[in-house]
Image (cartoon, rainbow, N blue to C red):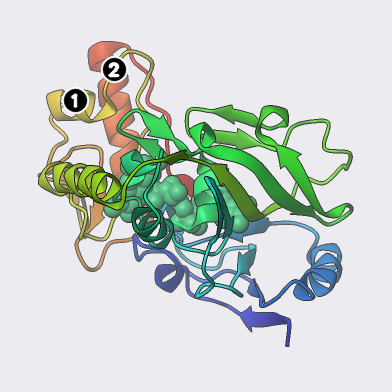
Amino acid sequence: MTLELLHKPSMAQLTSLGIGGNARVLAKVRDEAGLDELSRFVEREGSGLIAIGEGSNLLAGDGELNLALVQIACRSKAEALISGTRVLAPADMRLPGLLATLIKNGLSGMEGLAGIPGSVGGSVAMNAGSYGTDMQSSVKRVRLWTPSKGLFWKDTADLEWGYRHFSIGQNNGSEDDFFLVWEVEFELTRSTEEEVRGRIKNNFEKKKSTQPVTAKTAGCVFKNPEGYSAGRLLDEAGFKGKKIGGMGFSEMHANFLENKGNGTAAQALELMDQASEAVAEKFGVTLKPEVIILS
Ligand SMILES: Cc1cc2nc3c(=O)[nH]c(=O)nc-3n(C[C@H](O)[C@H](O)[C@H](O)COP(=O)(O)OP(=O)(O)OC[C@H]3O[C@@H](n4cnc5c(N)ncnc54)[C@H](O)[C@@H]3O)c2cc1C
């Protein structure tokens, strides 16, 4: 079976935040041949199509969600292919796994991304970043899939990148809204195993001491507004540690929402509303969600 369909998948099980109801269906692409079946699935399902990776940046709503999820789940054990300083990684490889490969091969450029738990595909789609770097800085080209064009490569310069923003652009030659990141080629620089390991270790230690990396979260809830730290604004507005039911802003870092065990999306969204209202009132700054809200 190259496209596996699961009906009524639990969003709580598919996301690191561990909350949310059930989607309509989840299509798991098991291999490249599954993409032919996926075209028919996309046509059949029509609306509410969402790509999903490791679910580490998603806040899913409660109850029945009219969503058809598509997840690449074929090569999670596959190795990235290394050729000199070029690295080819499948979208469903986990970013920490890719960083481990870069350590072994002494390849530098992505050390700032230590501690980001997503997939390679989701990390491109979010232009994930930290410690002064992001995916865009190392990506040379991306192999995309759209229902009308199938698989095709696009160079970094022809893609639209921004702060936690990625788009395949208007001129992708197809009318499709839905796309998948299928694989990614990185251009890195030569270093040594020891140096890359050291920088990754340092960055991860720094993260562990300032962020709740083992709690059930979706990373930072809000983007940093231009010139501000969202965490600091939330802290100064009194939201560090603030709870509603089973959800609460972390005691460690105010921009992380934690599911304390029995949280709901309604509680998370209420906290986010209250926090953004308070920050707007107190500082005149608008907070925009970094988490992707699926409802
Ligand atoms: C503890 C913790 C720490 C974090 N730290 C950081 C951090 O420092 N910096 C940072 O930027 N983020 C951070 N995050 C957020 C998250 O890990 C990143 O955004 C990650 O890149 C998301 O990858 P994912 O596979 O989980 O994507 P998902 O959460 O599954 O999806 C995110 C978005 O990508 C799209 N998408 C997913 N896969 C694909 C695909 N193959 N093709 C097309 N679109 C796709 C989805 O539709 C969605 O819009 C953190 C999260 C946690 C839980």
Q: Answer yes or no: do the residues labelled 2 and 1 have beta carbons within 8 Å?
A: yes
Three-letter amino acid code of the residue under disc 2:
Tyr
Neighbours of disc 2 within 10 Å: few (<14), some (14-19), many (20+): few
Q: Residue at x 89, y 39 (%)?
A: 173
Image vertical order of residue 255 relative to residue 95, above or below: above
Q: Quadrant of the C terminus?
A: bottom right
Neighbours of disc 1 within 10 Å: few (<14), some (14-19), many (20+): some
Image vertical order of residue 102 relative to residue 137, above or below: below
Asked which quadrant contains residue 262, the reply is bottom left
Q: Position of residue 177 (x, y in %)?
A: 76, 45
Q: Residue at x 25, y 44 (%)?
A: 195
Q: Is residue 195 left or right of residue 156?
A: left
Q: Quadrant of the N terminus?
A: bottom right
Q: Position of residue 162 (x, y in %)?
A: 54, 27
Q: Position of residue 187 (x, y in %)?
A: 55, 40
Three-letter amino acid code of the residue under disc 1:
Arg
Of 267 and 4, which appears nearest the observer?
A: 4
Residue 228 got which mark?
2
Identify residue for label 1.
Answer: 232
Q: Residue at x 18, y 51 (%)?
A: 212
Q: Residue at x 26, y 60 (%)?
A: 216
Image vertical order of residue 111 relative to residue 150, above or below: above
Residue 267 visible from this viewpoint: no
